[in-house]
Image (cartoon, helix red, strand yellow):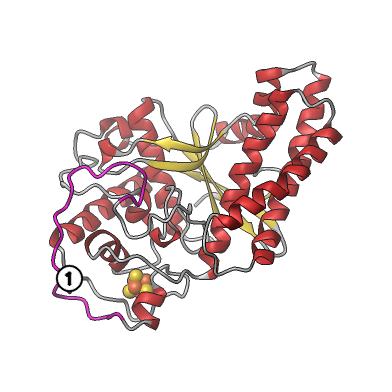
Amino acid sequence: MGVIHTCPTLYFFTFEEVARLAEYVSRMPRHVSEELRGWRWSEPPLLHTSAVYLSFSDVSYGVCPTGRDVYLRRVARVKSQVLPPEVEVGYVVHAAYSAAVASAKMLALAGVATGQDFIDSMRARFEEFIHGLYASQRWGLTREEVFKTAWPVWDHASVIFGGALERGRAKRLSGDSLAAYVAPFHVEYPVEGYRLGLTQGYVDALLPPAVPVEIKVGAAAHWHRVELAAYALALEATLHTPVDFGVLVYVQPEPFHYYYAVVPIGDSLRLEFAEARDRKARLVESGVDPGAPEKCSKQCPYYHYCEVAGAGRLGGAAVLPQRRLRLGEKGREGGGGAASGGLHSGGGAGGGSERQGPGQGG
Ligand code: SF4
């Protein structure tokens, strides 16, 4: 288990925070078996032998114990029409986070003079952001609810990055150096998954040198760690550098606060990923509906479909004709899947990091 921390700043990852985190993990014990490094993807146990390529969230998402969500998305091609509010809230948090970081980098590059000017400019940009966000989708949430969820994230980013900009100015930094000092990380970093049997994903943030960060809304769950391991393995396979730790940031929108866990990506999480990947790939290959568990979470993106609309909890024989599976399905997550409506599903109910519709449930 990772260590749980509450932290006033480790969410927006200024230069000082990244350095502090690096020092912290340098003291943590680590052991990863060589055969479980991502760069050993071409040999068991990481070897992917199926023709089915799943998304990062398909593999790790743990809200449906039977994996019926994967069946509905990948085989039956069901698009979840009515999303739980938690999924939408998660999406808003992610969207606000990404846009706030991007705005902060732009303002730092543009040469904003003072921390206060920076904060004022960030706040001025919020209106445009929230208008675009609300216009981008049909929401179950009201405009006010979207606003109330996004604003604390945005405003907090303004203050944290504004302080960093002030410190960077004091060090006589400017241009790209200043932007790198204010926000020395990437959001929605693309992660190639094909070597490990996955489609392309997008980790919420990547800190230097190679620390994946996932942002989740709501309660902590074990599958968040498995998802982090999937990103770590895929990064290792691509970058050929060890990724021994990741960070999970848990955001509670109301009242707004957050905490984080530093997660060692050890052997057991790596093996859990490989087992889940193989099991869910077999499920899709079989084309058979695994049926519903005894009890379904209301946070599942398919809750309305399975439980409320009475679309069947039976499982067993496939209800729909099996579709031809595309080999090596790639592209943006959810492409061809159930819910490619454009939302990046949020952490709470859906968690997840693929740029996809919230119904993806990742
Ligand atoms: S509603 Fe239940 S059966 Fe349907 S996908 Fe979700 S957890 Fe699985």
Ligand 1 within 8 Å, label 1 CB: no
Looking at the image, which residue is at 79% across and 27% down? 112
Tell me: residue 292, above or below residue 138.
below
Find residue 98 and report its image quarter.
top right
206 lies above or below 219: above
Give the residue at mark 1.
320
Q: Quadrant of residue 148?
A: bottom right
Membership of 332 in magenta stretch: yes
Indicate the amino acid at tag 1: Leu
Residue found 58% across the figure and 49% down from its top: 95
Q: Residue at 16% across / 68% down in the picture?
A: 288
Of residues 126 and 45, which is closer to you in this image? 126
Magenta-colored span: 311-335
Q: Main secondary structure of the magenta part?
A: loop
- Where does residue 214 sit, x and y in percent of width and height? 51, 47
Ligand 1 picture quarter: bottom left
Residue 348 is situated, as x and y percent measured from the top left of the image, at 52, 61
Answer few, some or many: residues within 10 Å of disc 1's Cα (few below 14, many 20 plus, some between 14 and 19): few
Residue ranking furthest to the top:
172
